[in-house]
Image (tube, rainbow, N blue to C red):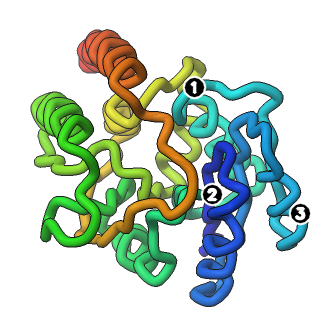
Amino acid sequence: MKILIAVVAYNEEKNLPAVFKDLAEHNFGYDVVLIDNGSSDETAKVAAEHGIPCVRHCVNTGSASGTLRAYFEYAHRYNYDILCQFDGDGQHFAAKLPLVITPIQEDRADYVIGSRFLKKEGFQSTALRRMGITLMANIASRSIGFPFTDITSGFRAYSKRVIDYIAMQYPYEIHDTLQLAMVSSMSGARFAEVPIIMQERIHGTSEYNISFASKYMLKSLVNSLGCKLQMKKRKK
């Protein structure tokens, strides 16, 4: 199976060298691409120095909305069987990649989430973000019928079923991971969560603050309502 690791980054020039080194040390045959979400620093240059192809956005698309569409279309264009998102802030460990990829390789799942909350080890995010994650996980669980615990985790893997559906059959924007999970369920995707450990970023600060989180949650709720209507329409 052809496997692609999509590293998503926005102004992560200081964290990326360690991220690329970690991926190189644990590479078991996968390719790597950097999705640069309109960085104003040397993020793209760091990728070039490490021989990593880069898809650059001319502007920041806000959160991960634009990067999702970019890496799904990249994976579809180059005919990858498995796609895995890996954040460029240094919070993920490349040694844990087999955990999220194996269920797809063994045809047990199409959408696998690396959850930091199954065993509650390592960095657990901030209290504010955990509140939002819990709300979004509950909405996803009720809508899809799978008991999600970490719906916003940036450590995720997708099968070709999901790759092709998002790239070829879903022409709309995807705002967040709640919407992404609901849309993926329309393709018939089977879901799974596996326990992983994350660490707190070393350099830089997260895009998420109270103002951003409030707007993000409002958009998420609106998008989830739209997805529910789409899901009902498909059932008819």
In the rendered structure, which disc, 3 or 1, sits on the residue that comes first in sequence? 3
Residue under the image location 34 percent in, 71 percent down? 103
SS at mark 3? helix
Q: Amino acid at mark 1?
A: Gly
Q: Amino acid at mark 3?
A: Ala
Dividing the picture into quadrants, the one containing residue 232 is: top left
Residue under the image location 62 percent in, 30 percent down? 66
Q: Amino acid at mark 2?
A: Ala
Q: Is residue 19 above or below residue 35?
A: below
Residue 234 at what x, y percent from top left? 32, 18
Residue under the image location 65 percent in, 43 percent down? 10
Question: Label 2: which residue?
Answer: 6
Question: Label 1: which residue?
Answer: 62
**122 or 230, which lies in front?**
122
Residue under the image location 25 percent in, 46 percent down? 126
Residue 68 at what x, y percent from top left? 57, 38
| Residue 101 can be seen, yes or no | yes
Looking at the image, residue 165 sits to the left or right of residue 11; the answer is left
Q: Residues within 10 Å of mark 3 (few under 14, many from 20)?
A: few
Looking at the image, residue 94 sits to the left or right of residue 194; the answer is right
The label number, if any, that marks residue 48 in the structure image: 3
